[in-house]
Amino acid sequence: MGNEMMRRKTKQWNDKKKQKRKLRPCCEIQSRTRQTQVVISSEPKQTTKPKHSSKLAYSTTTTTATTTSTNSYQPFSFVPMLLVLFLFVSFLSFPAFSLPHHPFPANQTFRPEKELQKLKRVNAYLKKINKPAVKTIQSSDGDVIDCVLAHLQPAFDHPLLKGQKPLDPPERPKGHESKETIQESYQQWTESGESCPEGTIPVRRTTEKDILRASSIGRYGRKPRRHVRRDSTGSGHEHAVVFVNGEQYYGAKANLNVWAPRVTDQYEFSLSQLWVISGSFGNDLNTIEAGWQVSPELYGDNYPRFFTYWTTDAYQATGCYNLLCSGFVQTNNKIAIGAAISPRSSYNGRQFDIGLMVWKDPKHGHWWLEFGSGLLVGYWPDFLFSHLRSHATMLQFGGEIVNSRSSGFHTSTQMGSGHFSGEGFGKASYFRNLQIVDWDNNLLPLSNLHLLADHSNCYDIRQGKNNVWGTYFYYGGPGRNVRCP
């Protein structure tokens, strides 16, 4: 009996031992899994392999928990990758964040060298037109005014002016003495109290943005090719003007009030000016022009700016605005041509006007410009012109706008104050004290005055005369309205 019991116990012990050996791989797997979990949960790593008890290996509850943890880790590690893929696909499919389309049609090739060449030409022009400054003034309206030595200004790049200096002031026309008291500060850049020293002239600095707004570098600073007056329907230019012709004229003078009309398209403008004209209205047209204008394309804003212009071939290849080419010779250190005029007139409020006079110097034959109350700005040398080298055959005063019809109907760009002439003083724009200069350098009132409004339902004009304002007229309008579709 004793031996039998011993055999049974020995057999049971051996069976248990075998069973324990069979289960050991499961225990090892579970122990490795738990070791992996410890590492991923950022707990301290064990340097030696943990010793698991046989009780732990045999525990059904522990094994189930371990298996659940292991299985739950696998999908959890895959979720971030799925989430990233989902967000990326959403990013590509959502319109606001989709990758941009190629900016060029399939049949065109992007040529960066063309853009580089354009920028080189722009920079070359800027280097040519922006002369070295003795002093620089920052205007509150964003302009940069350079004080340039007078003999280094762009005009003296002209072959016939190289090495010369500005001329002394000429004799003014007889009867020009003004008894009016008008403030001497006309431009916004002077409001800081800064000024250009004697011997220099203030020049509005041209920027890269200014040139890139133009249709081309070659057309920058030039008016579009078109007729000055009549038949303006096809060219998109519309006028409300008075003019005299049929005689020989040696100058013109007037006062005009300054507004800030709304210009609704970047490539349109609104201006008020006087014209000194000679030649036919073909390719040999000569003009000298001065006044104020709002031109977003030329200046990048909607401020009214003092400007000049000239051409000797009907705006084709010669001439330019302001000092943007060799031509006009500036002599004044207080006025910056192309700078914003301040203050301005307000509707039913204070009116502010400026004086303008252009006349031919009897001694040297050059055409001089006066601005404000007796400020000589400079002159156009007579050799720039063909017909105007002797005299003018027409003088014109008034407003002009460009109607591009970019929206398919008449523009809402305003002329003058944006109100019709019938509204009168304080509401409509005006010219007053219109005069001409005759062959003997005398200022005389106008006679045989003609009125012209290309589209009177859009912009109109009304003339008058009295002892205070002499010959005057109101003009302008809102552009598109019920009667101007």
Image: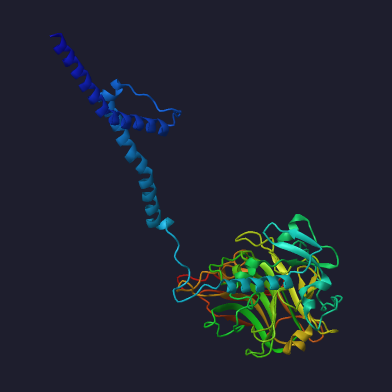
Which of the 4 image quadrants contains residue 29? top left
Task: Tell me the residue at 35%/43% (across/down).
Answer: 78
Q: 396 or 36: which is nearer to us?
A: 36
In the picture, which quadrant includes the N terminus?
Answer: top left
Residue 284 image position (x, y, % from top left): 67, 90
Task: Tell me the residue at 29%/20% (across/down).
Answer: 55
Which of the 4 image quadrants contains residue 460? bottom right
57 in relation to 382, above or below: above
Q: Is residue 54 left or right of residue 45?
A: left
**Residue at far top of view:** 2
100 in relation to 384, above or below: above
**Residue at far left of view:** 1
Q: Is residue 387 left or right of residue 98?
A: right
Residue 319 image position (x, y, % from top left): 69, 80
Residue 163 image position (x, y, % from top left): 85, 78
In the picture, which quadrant includes the C terminus?
Answer: bottom left
Residue 466 image position (x, y, % from top left): 69, 73
Q: 411 or 357: which is nearer to us?
A: 411
Determine if residue 173 is in view: yes
